[in-house]
Amino acid sequence: MAWVQLFLKRRVTSNYMRTDPDTQLMLDVKAGDQAAFQRLFDRYKKRIINYCFRFCGNSAVAEELAQETFLRVYKAAPRYRPKAKFQTWLYKIATNVSLNEMRKPIYRARLDSLDQAADDTGQGSAADPAVADERLTPDALLAAKERDRLMFRVMDQLPQQQRAALLLRVHEAFSYRDIGLQIDCSENQVKTLIHRGRQRMKKLMASYWGDRHE
Amino acid sequence: MNDPCNTAHLISALLDGELPEAEANRLRRHIRACTACSDNLEALVQNDALIRELPEIEPSDQFERTFWSKVESIDRQREKSAWWRFWLSGWRPVAAGALAGAMAAALFFNAGRDRQLSPEEIFLAENAELLEAFELIENLDILEHWDAIELMEEQS
């Protein structure tokens, strides 16, 4: 019955609005409140940059992806209708933006050239001294850099959906239900993606560490 | 893959806190008694920790500047298109269409009606009979069918 579905949908929507302050802020943005957008941007910019950074392993590309994410939010504001928590929606956009970027044929070549430039200048990549912990000793710093480089390489070899699901769960601590909304999958599919991602990662880590110790 | 008990997918869900409580307790008991599953859990915990420990980056100096300049450019585009949206919203397109149609019809039906005559044409009209008498013009009686001639000229 359509009217029952509509009623339930509206009820869910109003629940989100009551419980999620960020959704309320986004509704303020929809009403033309620029300061509300500034607050959302300030609240999430670092998290979204870092989420994108985990996808691509390059800070310059991560910033571009984060900008594109927030620009899409801003453009979508006039027709915004809360269907999930704001954070879930925001990460869905960031995931789509990141996955779309990776599907572009030019992406790999661009990333390689940026990494090369970062290696030459010592800035911008995962091995950037600015992103490493300054309290570490030189040896520990080197080991940490190597470990991060390896992790990015392993993450890079995971299928895109697995990588997204794993990052959303392990790093961003979203529930399976929210991840399902973000990558358009059922909870069971999310469970399988994360499990397979973890198994593949375990295998890749074992093979990399094995290669290094030989 | 070393998963003799076929529990790897359950261990993954356990790690995420996504297993029902009864099933989680059952699995925890099994893991305590099974070395392979215990090792599997430990490896997954370590790998998760590696993902969490990936370095954090700070937004660069130009990140915000570039972003807000892009937002400004979107605002400018919105302002430009606001004029068109105003005219294309509600009853305005219908009214504008009706007005344009009325103007087109008026132009069509009145084309040439108010054309000003030149002094030569006025002279000819005023002195037509005299000029015929002097045999400077001929067939003046044709002018009685002037509307038909005008129509033929337009068609040609």
Image (tube, coloured by chain):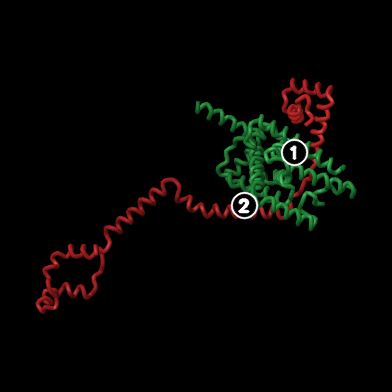
Chain colours: A green, B red
Question: Does residue B76 lie above or below A78 as drawn?
Answer: below
* Quadrant where the C terminus of chain B is found in the figure: bottom left
Res A35 seen here: no
The front one of A47 and B23 is: B23
**Of the residues tagged 1 and 2, which is closer to the observer?**
1
Chain of residue at mark 2 = B
Residue type at mark 1?
Answer: His
Label 1: element kind: helix
Which of B40/A95 is in front?
Answer: B40
Q: Are marks 1 and 2 on the same chain?
A: no
Rendering quarter of residue B10: top right
Identify the element where label 2 is drawn.
Answer: helix
- Residue B83: horizontal and vertical position, in percent? 49, 53
- Quarter of the figure with residue A120: bottom right
The residue at which mark 2 appears reads as B71
- Between residues B48 and B99, which one lies in front from this camera angle? B48
Q: Residue at x 21, y 62 (%)?
A: B151
Q: Position of residue B43 (x, y in %)?
A: 81, 33
Chain ID, mark 1: A
> Among all residues in the image, which is located at the extreme bottom?
B134
Instruction: Name the residue: 21% across, 75% down.
Output: B120
How far, Cα to Cα, is label 1 from label 2? Answer: 29 Å
Mark 1 burial class by Cα count in 10 Å: few <14, some 14-19, many 20+ = some
**Residue that label 1 marks:** A171
